[in-house]
Amino acid sequence: MLAGIELQKLEQSALYQHLQGEWNQEPVNQEHMNQVVQQLGFDPRKDVTAVLIASNGNAPIALARGKFPMQQLQAKFQAQHMQRATYKGHEVFSRGEDAVMFVRNDVMAVGQTRAIERLADEAAEGGGGIPHALQDRLAKLRKDATVWVVSDHGLPLMGVPLQQNVKSALSNIEGYVTGVTAGAAFDQDAHFQGDIDCISVEGAQRVHDALRGGIGLARLATNDNALDMLRLYDAINVSKEDKRVKVNADLSSSLIDKVLPHLPQVRQRVRQRLENAQ
């Protein structure tokens, strides 16, 4: 699995700048970001230009490219009692099973120590690289995607902690999925395109029906007077072609503006309906 976020390109989009302006007006959000900056030792909003997450199904690694205050970060890691070592010519700071490695002055890798060391081993040996199956999927991404994910082994969940009701819902379809290619692009609006490849035509039908059912469940959990949320669900198109399920959505900035305040309440109502159904 590979997932990427081109933060610099995302931040240059009209939609991001519009939403960021509204976000910055909230004192609580500003306070939270200030705490994040203090904990990290750098400001991801300004200093990180891109993030890549890679996983072999067991141990994901996150790589961030940007401008990092190396000396300040190293001093911060040591103050947090992280062990410092040099591995294959790279500075590595670790604590327990987790580690941070400076791949280059502008690239930092974070993950489990064994995964970090394997990354350094492959770099030293001239190996590694992107598997052909994922290269083929990357070639099929929409060219303007700034947020994307490709997977050649089922759903790209990579050990993300999920609530039990979400796990239960995904367990009904994950056995039918062989791979995913999905990307989102942003200008003044938001555009999403995703392909879910399945083990069979019947499996694709199950995934298609489950996604349509999920959208229907969300509609049921939405108040009748929340017309903007209903327009959001109507904008999501799910179709099936042979063993592939296609998901597409084009969301205007005006619609995104209107639905964002409703999302926490909708998530809560959907969660309650799932729990009642179980």
Image (cartoon, helix red, strand yellow):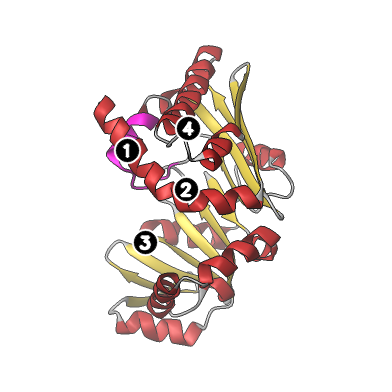
Q: Label 3 is placed on what type of residue? A: Thr
State the CA–CA distance, disc 1 to disc 3.
Answer: 36 Å
Q: Which stretch did the figure color magenta?
A: 157-170
Where residue 60 appears, as percent x and y from the top left, is 43, 52
Query: In the displayed structure, would residue 15 be above or below residue 184?
Result: below
Q: Label 1 is placed on what type of residue? A: Arg
In which quadrant is the C terminus drawn? top left
Tell me which label, 1 or 4, sits earlier in the chain. Answer: 4
Where residue 202 appears, as percent x and y from the top left, is 51, 12
Query: In the displayed structure, would residue 188 be above or below residue 94?
Result: above
Query: Is residue 130 in view from this perspective?
Result: yes
Where residue 117 appears, as percent x and y from the top left, is 43, 61
State the CA–CA distance, disc 4 to disc 2.
Answer: 12 Å
Mark 4 crowdedness (10 Å alpha carbons): few <14, some 14-19, many ≥20: many
Residue 106, which numbered label?
Answer: none
Q: Which residue in the protein does label 4 denote?
A: 154
Q: Which residue in the protein does label 3 denote?
A: 113
Q: Label 2 is placed on what type of residue? A: Ser
Of badges 2 and 3, nearer the viewer stands 2
Question: Which of the two residues, 147 or 129, is positioned nearer the viewer here?
Answer: 147
Q: Label 4 is placed on what type of residue? A: Gly
In the displayed image of the protein, which residue is found farthest to the right? 143
Residue 55, which numbered label?
Answer: 2
Q: Which residue in the protein does label 1 denote?
A: 271
Say which element carries label 2.
Answer: loop
Tell me which label, 2 or 3, sits earlier in the chain. Answer: 2
Q: Residue at x 64, y 66 (%)?
A: 17
Query: Is residue 127 in view from this perspective?
Result: no
Say which element carries label 4.
Answer: loop
